[in-house]
Image (cartoon, rainbow, N blue to C red):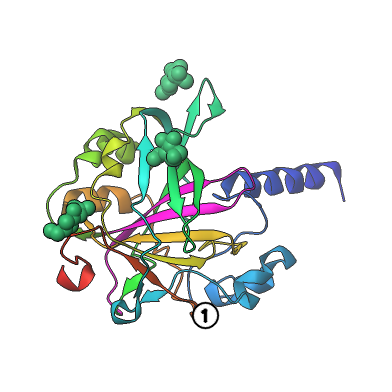
Amino acid sequence: MTVSTWAAVVLLSSLTVALSHEEGGGPSFGYTPGTPDGPENWGKLSPAYKACNEGKAQSPIDIVTASAIPNPNLDTLSRVYVPCNATLHNNGKDIVMTFERDGEPVMPGSINITTADGTVKVFRFKMVHWHVPAEHSINGKRFPLELHLVHADDHGDKAVVGILYKIGKPDPFYDQLTEKLRELKETPTVAAGMVELKSLQKRTGSYFRYMGSLTTPPCTENVVWNILGKGREMSQEQFELITAPLPHQDNRPPQPLNGRIVAFYNPPNSTISHYTYM
Ligand SMILES: *[C@@H]1O[C@H](CO)[C@@H](O)[C@H](O)[C@H]1NC(C)=O
Ligand SMILES: *[C@@H]1O[C@H](CO)[C@@H](O)[C@H](O)[C@H]1NC(C)=O
Ligand SMILES: *[C@@H]1O[C@H](CO)[C@@H](O)[C@H](O)[C@H]1NC(C)=O
């Protein structure tokens, strides 16, 4: 190998690492079913991606609301997010938002997760990404967009809050990103400045809980999933802004439950609200 090809290989592999939105790096992957790097082949692209094909607790899933089991040990998803300097990335696969202060990654908030047996674990707010259309479906119905709020603990285990969007009233959260999302169409990385995150905490009532995986390679099975029982709305214009930078869909198809339980939490004394009522 010549020095320049070697340099190209090194450059390419460091690019791959930079482009992967979860840690792990590894080869590129695609979303088009039936292609060599499509979702059903992710597990064959690298030994590190084996869980994508061989795992038994993969995400996303179709949530069947009638089969979700209320669990009285679960508690409200208590979250605190503070404003933070953010960067938007178009990694060619997904649109991602990361947080930093003085150039260093920071975690601008945390979530307390009550597990099925009633113990509380703390995870810190790490990043945000969007999937179009939604990855999780509800009773087979797929919403136009899904927002993932990714939290991690000290061991790298994750707690993700998934919010499904339908088209309707504008969501004020996106107003602060309008210009930045326009720029993201032209350039892969955009400094978004100070971003207010508190509005992402709103309306955390009922949710569906199950144990699953990252929805992108390496598909690691270390994620506590929390899909909010009540979706949000965004305007058609906002939807177009967030989807314009990516020319393709980026939703992994639903994975088998393999006997996993989907639990349901509903706040005390609230009328049951979930997607069958949207
Ligand atoms: C999480 O729980 C701890 C201990 O009860 C509490 O001090 C902290 O404020 C909680 N954090 C959030 C985000 O609710
Ligand atoms: C926030 O980001 C801006 C660029 O968007 C930068 O000039 C500023 O120094 C950053 N502030 C902090 C505290 O990191
Ligand atoms: C729920 O309603 C019952 C009966 O009205 C009341 O006693 C209880 O305090 C309420 N619980 C909460 C958390 O509001």
Check the picture and name the quadrant holding the C terminus.
bottom left
Ligand 3 is found in which quarter of the picture? bottom left
Asked if the magenta segment contains residue 167, the reply would be no
Residue at horizontal 35 percent and vertical 28 percent from the top: 83
Main SS category, magenta section: strand
Q: Looking at the image, is 10 positioned above or below residue 65?
A: above
Between residues 188 and 75, which one lies in front from this camera angle? Answer: 75
Question: What residue does disc 1 label?
Answer: 34
Q: Measured from the top left, where is residue 196 in percent x and y? A: 30, 31
Between residues 102 and 40, which one lies in front from this camera angle? Answer: 102
Residue at horizontal 45 percent and vertical 76 percent from the top: 261
Between residues 240 and 218, which one lies in front from this camera angle? Answer: 218
The outermost residue toward the right is: 1
Q: Is residue 256 left or right of residue 50?
A: left
Report helix, strand or loop for mark 1. loop
Residue at horizontal 38 percent and vertical 76 percent from the top: 62
Count of labels shown? Answer: 1
Residue 189 in view: no
Q: Measured from the top left, where is residue 23 in percent x and y? A: 62, 49
Amino acid beneath label 1: Gly
Residue at horizontal 36 percent and vertical 55 percent from the top: 75
Q: Is residue 52 left or right of residue 234?
A: right
Q: Is the CB of the residue bearing disc 1 within 8 angstroms of ligand 2?
A: no
Residue 111 in view: yes
Callout 1 crowding tier (Cα within 10 Å): few <14, some 14–19, many ≥20: few
Q: Measured from the top left, where is residue 46 in percent x and y? A: 71, 66
Rendering quarter of residue 209: bottom left
Q: Measured from the top left, where is residue 128 in percent x and y? A: 42, 46
Query: Bounds of the magenta span?
Result: 140-164
